[in-house]
Image (spheres, rainbow, N blue to C red):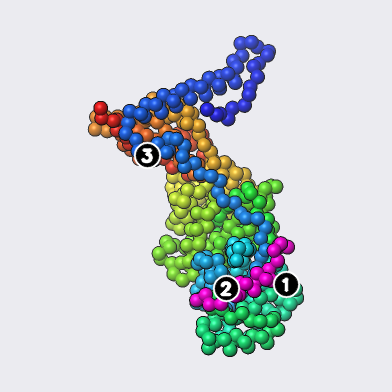
Amino acid sequence: MSSDQTDATPAETDPGTPDLGATTDETTADDAQREYALRAGLAEYDLEDEDLAILDGAGDPGDLERGPRVLPVLAVVGRPNVGKSTLVNRIIGRREAVVEDKPGVTRDRVSYQAEWAGRQFTLVDTGGWETDVAGIDASVAKQAEIAIDLADAVLFVVDATVGPTATDEHVVKLLRRSKKPIVLCANKVDGPRAEADAATLWSLGLGEPHAVSALHGRGTGDLLDAAMAKLPTVSAHGVARPDGPRRVALVGRPNVGKSSLLNKVAGANRVVVDETAGTTRDPVDELIELRGKPWWFVDTAGIRRRVHQTQGADFYASLRTQAAIEKAEVAVVLVDASVPMTEQDTRVISQVVEAGRALVIAYNKWDLMDEDRRPYLEREIEKDLVQIQWAPRVNLSAKTGWHADRLVPALERALGSWDTRIPTGRLNAFLGELVAAHPHPLRGGKQPRILFATQPSTRPPRFVIFASGFLEAGYRRFIERRLREEFGFEGSPIEISVRVREKRKR
């Protein structure tokens, strides 16, 4: 039986001082004996194969997958609505990038891991590049330019059915100045008749236009062969993804400041920020070093309403956000502190808890909140978040960076709880004391008895209780509350399942 104790030396000044190390050893030994006795007592009950697997410690989760090594970067660029995201989905073999039949759906540069002919690389989708634009469109174009600068090679996508445009000519000049290897993709060539349209793109001076149909997959293999020939095997721009970075999803309803917070902690304008709600549509990953440690931050689309009530790009953005939560280890839910909490806020928090992820609640725009608003906010927290008082709270301003440095300690506490495992002996000793002081209410003249408990997994902590009868929901909540009081679990949901087992019939 292992314990987290440290070796203690007996006090030399007073021979009557108790030996704390010995006391801890005795306690650990008592816990081990209790565990052995209770475990042996289960032999009298009918147990299923799954029960035995849990009791034998099967199913302990391994470490979550960490990011890959440094990979060469291939950026997909072009003007709006030429089919860049459709091509990205075709290359990676799944519908990841948000696609809709109108320009301007993609806004940030978004990275995906891809593979072709045994070679792994990072594929970067970008927003449409345009000239002489302002506002959000200018920000999107800027992100595309940054993607070119940080790429090892560029896949330039042109709509073959339209032919070369003035905007395409501007992009060509930009690409030539970058001096990056370029592969020209003539998209929307859906059949032999459109081959002639692709041939007109020789005029761009970038070499052979590779005719493809991203929608149907036609010609994409030859295109990727050409791209692999241009893409170096050793990246000059790829980001190292060493073992260890924890994945943090920034989630919340639209316009609460998720992208502003990512830009602030990154120390650069990594994602597009605009007053327009719903600017972000694809999850955006960024490796950021904070306090000497790397973290993967994922900016997500704002969750507007229930997924089935959304449509178009917002529908797929909602699905991507849900997937980003499930891939993350901890979620930071941003709430606008300056206005009343909404049903959307509580729904986002529920999504994180239901996904079993560690949770930190960040009350953003604190600098915009007047003194009269604060007591109302506290009442809202007590009323709407009564079931998640265990989540760490951080008050901050993503725009100015005020108190943003408090985010990392809260993340570390939440993840520490998410990873916590209680020794089986200690857990059963705790429950024995709890039940002795507060027994379960009688049910039909009988009193359910806790036979044994174990924690088969972490991330989130999951407890399985074997009992002789059904434990009421109120009593299970009571056990959870006391578990948190005893062992912490700040920032982590807890799962408690009860397995009712009967004695074997003789």
- The quadrant holding residue 165 is bottom right
Name the residue tied to disc 3: 49
Helix, strand or loop at disc 3? helix
236 part of magenta stretch: yes
Amino acid type, residue under disc 1 in the picture? Lys
Q: Residue furthest top?
A: 15
Closer to the chain start, of discs 2 and 3, is 3
Q: Is residue 402 visible?
A: no
Quarter holding the C terminus is: top left
Q: Is residue 317 visible?
A: yes
Helix, strand or loop at disc 2? helix
Q: What segment carries the magenta color?
A: 215-237
Mark 3 and mark 2 in contact (Cβ < 8 Å)? no
Q: Label 1 to label 3, Cα distance in Å?
A: 59 Å
Name the residue tied to disc 1: 180
Residue displayed at 32% across by 36% down: 500
Residue displayed at 52% across by 47% down: 358
Amino acid type, residue under disc 2 in the picture? Gly
- The quadrant holding residue 288 is bottom right
Q: Residue furthest left?
A: 444
Closer to the chain start, of discs 1 and 3, is 3
Q: In the drawing, does residue 94 fall left or right of residue 6?
A: left
Q: What crowding class fits label 1: few (fewer than 14 Cα within 10 Å), some (14-19), or many (20 or more)?
A: some
Q: Nearer the viewer, mark 1 or mark 3?
A: 3
Residue displayed at 53% across by 62% down: 301
Q: Label 2 to label 3, Cα distance in Å?
A: 48 Å
Q: Nearer the viewer, mark 1 or mark 2?
A: 2
